[in-house]
Amino acid sequence: MEIEDLRLAVEGLSFRFAKTMPEFPHWYVVRSPENEATYVALFHAIHEHGYAATFGGRRYKYLQLGDGFKYWAMTTDIRASRIINRDEVTPGTNDG
């Protein structure tokens, strides 16, 4: 899936605010049968085209789609992946 197509598909995902982590505000989407194709495409794009960065002592792959957000998964194993996170890109930082 091309990045532009992926960006449009991701707009259809239902991200929820992670209210249990107010110190690190971000949103997440839970993998479901209804969003499986887009979820899997986003997961693979993160790991194939993303950049590595450290947060909380762990390295993650992040992907920016040009929509003002960066996306990351909590695992590198698609079989174990259940959540993809996103956070706003902060202009003027190494985020974008």
Image: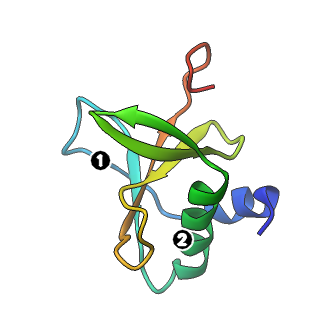
Q: Looking at this rendering, what residue extends furthest in the bottom direction?
A: 33
Residue displayed at 76% across by 69% down: 1
Q: Looking at this rendering, what residue extends furthest in the left direction?
A: 20
Residue displayed at 61% across by 48% down: 50
Q: What residue type is disc 1 on? A: Ala
Colour scheme shown:
rainbow
Packing grade of label 2 (10 A; few <14, some 14-19, many >=20) is many
Packing grade of label 1 (10 A; few <14, some 14-19, many >=20) is some
Instruction: Compare marks 1 and 2 and give the one earlier in the sequence.
Output: 1
Q: Position of residue 87 (x, y in %)?
A: 47, 39
Residue displayed at 50% across by 83% down: 34
Identify whether 23 is placed above or below 77.
above
Looking at the rendered structure, which numbered label has been put on residue 10? none
In the rendered structure, the answer to whether residue 60 lies left or right of residue 89 reads: left
Residue underneath mark 1: 18
Q: Position of residue 7 (x, y in %)?
A: 71, 56
Q: Position of residue 93 (x, y in %)?
A: 56, 16
Residue 69 sits in which quadrant? top right
Residue underneath mark 2: 39
Task: Examine the rendering and report whether any part of residue 15 can be seen.
Answer: yes
Q: What residue type is disc 2 on? A: Tyr
Identify whether 28 is placed above or below 56.
below
Identify whether 40 is placed above or below 22.
below
